[in-house]
Image (cartoon, rainbow, N blue to C red):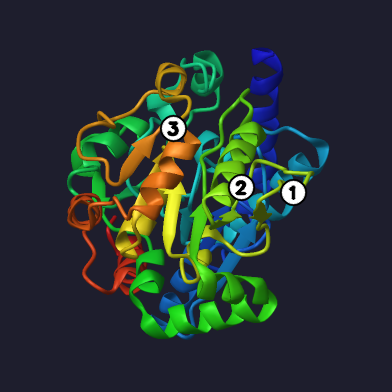
């Protein structure tokens, strides 16, 4: 396998070298494999870049990939064709995850590559910190694929999180820049929140009806590899229905829920962050989404039926019993009872948000300014 990968890398470099022979068009390239459409971070960043420089050439390339090292034929064609050409044309490349060409290829000396990552905060281990673990990459594959090599800048959401991001990406702490994601602007903008809420309720009138009669809970769990993700959803939905809680389930993008779940609404159209505008409380687990919920001022409840086994499989940067917000339980019925008792300590939620995100009110603008200035830092 390693020989095949090495040959693939040489072929990719050869193709890339041909693209490098052509004149560079310049501009900013934003690359994501988290979905086929631009995330809210990418959309807000693009708007901020255009406001700062209306003449800037911006190209966005989103191609969903479940695996950081996916080698399907269609993905290879995409990578060897339009993606490599876009890299060859760019002054700056912005990533929100591991990108094969960014790390394994030799680039123009003046190309700058920035890793903004797709999740705020650092709770569960990821990236290089997870290599060799049950849910992480194979160490040899990570080495051959130069996992997270080649970045000129890496963003972290707060000073507290810098050591964790440094470990996840394999860079010294002084290489990292505190720069929360643009989604913070959405969470703090009353106009965007109102417009999004109106748009969602227009397509989901049942949410408005549920809001009048009781509590709307948004359940946004993390993805568990080789686990009964759907079974956990069913247990929670059953208890929520019994206790009069209207449950919206927003599955992790990797998870494909094919069947309906009694007692819950499976939501696949709107992003989790958008659904914060219509819910009263948030239920999650080990997901970084609890940070977005905390920033939005939502009561947080954590459903943890597999806490011990998950920690053994995945591991955390910090002790989840020390400073993590909200109320937690491994029993769905008990958790729903605590929700109806309004048991969440909101001051602890606010303190958690301040610790994990250093937000000054202009995340997208700050990031855009950094991106526009970095080509001169040679």
Q: In the image shown, does 183 or 264 lie closer to the viewer? A: 264
Q: Residues within 10 Å of mark 3 (few under 14, many from 20)?
A: some
Q: Which numbered disc, 3 or 2, marks the residue that appears first in the sequence?
A: 2
How far is the residue under mark 3 from the one under mark 2?
Answer: 16 Å
Asked whether disc 3 touches disc 1, contact meaning CB atoms under 8 Å apart, the reply is no
Q: Quadrant of the C terminus?
A: bottom left
Q: Which mark is residue 353?
A: none
Instruction: Determine the secondary structure under disc 3.
Output: loop
Q: Which numbered disc, 2 or 1, marks the residue that appears first in the sequence?
A: 1
Q: Residue 260, image x and y in percent?
A: 76, 48
Tell me the residue at 63%/44% (across/down): 17
Within the image, what quadrant is residue 11 found in? top right
How far is the residue under mark 2 from the one under mark 1?
Answer: 27 Å
Q: Residues within 10 Å of mark 1 (few under 14, many from 20)?
A: few
* Between marks 3 and 1 in the image, the one whose residue lies nearer the viewer: 3
Task: Indicate left or right for 198 with 179 as reference.
Answer: right
* Residue carrying label 1: 78
Q: In the image shown, does 136 or 103 lie closer to the viewer? A: 136
Tell me the residue at 32%/43% (across/down): 327
Q: In the image shown, does 210 or 303 lie closer to the viewer? A: 210
What is the number of callouts on the image? 3
How far is the residue under mark 3 from the one under mark 1?
Answer: 39 Å
Within the image, what quadrant is residue 357 found in? bottom left
Q: Which mark is residue 251?
A: 2
Instruction: Determine the secondary structure under disc 2.
Output: loop
Q: Residue 293, image x and y in percent?
A: 38, 58
Give the answer, above or below, for where 344 lies relative to 324: below
Q: Residue 300, image x and y in percent?
A: 36, 51
Q: Which mark is residue 304?
A: 3
Task: Indicate left or right for 165 with 263 as reference.
Answer: left
Q: Which numbered disc, 3 or 1, marks the residue that appears first in the sequence?
A: 1
Instruction: Determine the secondary structure under disc 1.
Output: helix
């Amino acid at each position: 396998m390693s020989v095949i990968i090495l040959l693939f890398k040489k072929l990719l470099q050869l193709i890339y070298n041909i693209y490098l022979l052509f004149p560079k068009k310049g501009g900013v390239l934003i690359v994501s494999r988290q979905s086929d459409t631009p995330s809210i971070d990418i959309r807000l960043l693009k708007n901020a870049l255009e406001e700062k420089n209306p003449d800037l050439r911006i190209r966005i390339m989103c191609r969903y990939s479940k695996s950081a090292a996916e080698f399907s034929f269609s993905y290879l064609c995409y990578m060897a064709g339009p993606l490599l050409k876009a890299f060859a044309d760019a002054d700056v490349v912005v990533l929100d995850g591991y990108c094969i060409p960014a790390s394994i290829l030799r680039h123009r000396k003046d190309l700058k590559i920035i890793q903004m990552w797709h999740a705020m905060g650092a709770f569960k281990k990821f990236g290089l910190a997870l290599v060799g673990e049950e849910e992480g990459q194979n160490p040899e594959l990570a080495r051959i694929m130069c996992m997270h090599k080649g970045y000129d800048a890496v963003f972290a959401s707060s000073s507290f999180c810098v050591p964790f991001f440094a470990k996840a990406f394999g860079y010294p702490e002084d290489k990292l820049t505190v720069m929360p994601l643009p989604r913070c602007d959405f969470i703090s903008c009353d106009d965007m929140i109102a417009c999004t809420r109106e748009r969602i309720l227009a397509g989901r009138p049942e949410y408005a009806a549920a809001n009048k009669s009781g509590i709307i809970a948004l359940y946004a769990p993390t993805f568990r590899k080789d686990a009964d993700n759907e079974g956990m959803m069913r247990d929670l939905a059953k208890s929520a229905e019994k206790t009069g809680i209207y449950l919206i389930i927003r599955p992790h993008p990797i998870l494909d829920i094919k069947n309906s779940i009694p007692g819950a609404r499976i939501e696949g159209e709107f992003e989790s962050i958008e659904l914060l505008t219509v819910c009263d409380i948030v239920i999650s687990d080990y997901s970084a989404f609890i940070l977005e919920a905390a920033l939005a001022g939502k009561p947080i409840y954590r459903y943890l039926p597999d806490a011990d086994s998950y920690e053994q499989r995945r591991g955390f940067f910090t002790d989840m019993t020390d400073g993590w917000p909200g109320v937690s339980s491994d029993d769905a019925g008990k958790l729903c009872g605590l929700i109806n008792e309004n048991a969440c300590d909101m001051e602890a939620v606010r303190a958690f948000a301040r610790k994990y995100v250093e937000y000054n009110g202009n995340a997208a603008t700050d990031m855009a300014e950094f991106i526009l200035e970095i080509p001169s830092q040679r």
